[in-house]
Image (spheres, rainbow, N blue to C red):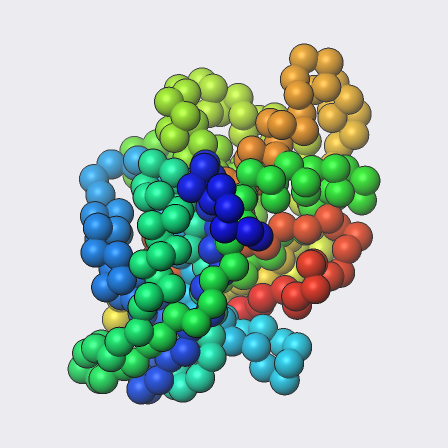
Amino acid sequence: MSRIGVHKLKLALLKTHVNVFGFAGYLFSGKLVKTILTRSIPRLEEFFRPTMGSTPKLLHISPLYRVKNNREVECVYSYAVCRKTSAYVKCIDALKPVTLNGRYYFYIGFHQSVENVTDVLNALLNYNECFEFMNQKVCAEIVEIEAWNAVELGKNLVARVMNSGGLKLVFASPTMLRDPLRIGGKYKTYLPTPETVFATPVYAKQIAEGEYAIKKFRSELLRLRRLFHETYSVLKSVMVKWVYYGGRPEPALVGYVNYRVNFEYFDFLKQGLNVEDWLGEIFAYMLALGVGAGRAAGFGHVELKPLAERKNTGEPPAKSL
């Protein structure tokens, strides 16, 4: 999109192309993305720090991606092949190492309260340096940035989803979901039902707009639960992968989920709600800020598309390998 007026974006999504050289080892590449961003824009450091409580971060990054064979998109991270027994998890193969030498890209999404989009663009486009990273000399140069208004993307997607009868959600980076209906702890879940997938975007939206209340939050999730339902294919299209993060393998979801629209409930909602605006805003937060936990570390990046569409805007969908 044009850089004219980008400073006015409420939710920005930037696709950043970068040349990286000099790393070999075990890595979840979101860690390197975070390092590049904080070195180029030091004031972002505070948004990456661990926080107390459950307040959502209004900043999200993805890991690095690379295009293989001019077609296939690979999300770059180390992982292990593990199997869970009745008593423990057993990893049956060595960790897959990562070598970074070439052209990659990553995404950064953020709310206007985090940073001015124009300032971020200017800082990133001037970034080119070598630095020490995990005891290695790594060189990185940002060469191109594509910027989108996530609110426009979300609103444009609603009509296409309704026309197709459903939504396809791709976990473009490993995703850690939590159960939004359990309190008193951070309970993980590996079932990508609508309420678990939409919970973080809904929560982030209500916090950002000063509208959060527990009853309203749960009411929104109930609406989404009634509007969308996962298809039987979810049992085959999603899997758990053991991602190397924080010095050990962690379970996370990869794959995709198909959701069908309940049009009877959609028509009911239209009687008292502008469904296109409401759902478009939620889609915008999903696209810009991701889903689940660990979004500021590179987890939970998603792609959304109409269920019947196999292609997005000319670019193959990213997948985790």
Q: Nearer the viewer, residue 3 or 107?
A: 3
Q: Residue at x 62, y 32 (%)?
A: 279
Number of marks in the rendered image: 0
Residue 85 relative to residue 127: left or right? right
Q: Position of residue 180 (x, y in %)?
A: 44, 35
Q: Position of residue 53 (x, y in %)?
A: 24, 36
Q: Position of residue 51 (x, y in %)?
A: 22, 43
Seen in the picture, residue 252 relative to 216 is either above or below; the reply is below
Residue 71 relative to residue 242: left or right? right
Q: Residue at x 67, y 25 (%)?
A: 275
Query: In the displayed image of the protein, which residue is found farthest to the top?
Result: 272
Q: Nearer the viewer, residue 9 or 106?
A: 9
Seen in the picture, residue 215 relative to 79 is either above or below; the reply is above
Q: Residue at x 47, y 44 (%)?
A: 6
Q: Nearer the viewer, residue 32 or 300?
A: 32
Residue 31 relative to residue 157: left or right? left
- Is residue 151 something that shows in the picture? yes
Q: Position of residue 235 (x, y in %)?
A: 65, 57
Q: Which quadrant of the figure has residue 211? A: top left
Q: Nearer the viewer, residue 200 or 179?
A: 200
Query: In the displayed image of the protein, which residue is found farthest to the front?
Result: 4
- Is residue 197 something that shows in the picture? no
Q: Residue at x 42, y 41 (%)?
A: 7
Q: Which quadrant of the figure has residue 58? A: top left
Q: Which quadrant of the figure has residue 132? A: bottom left
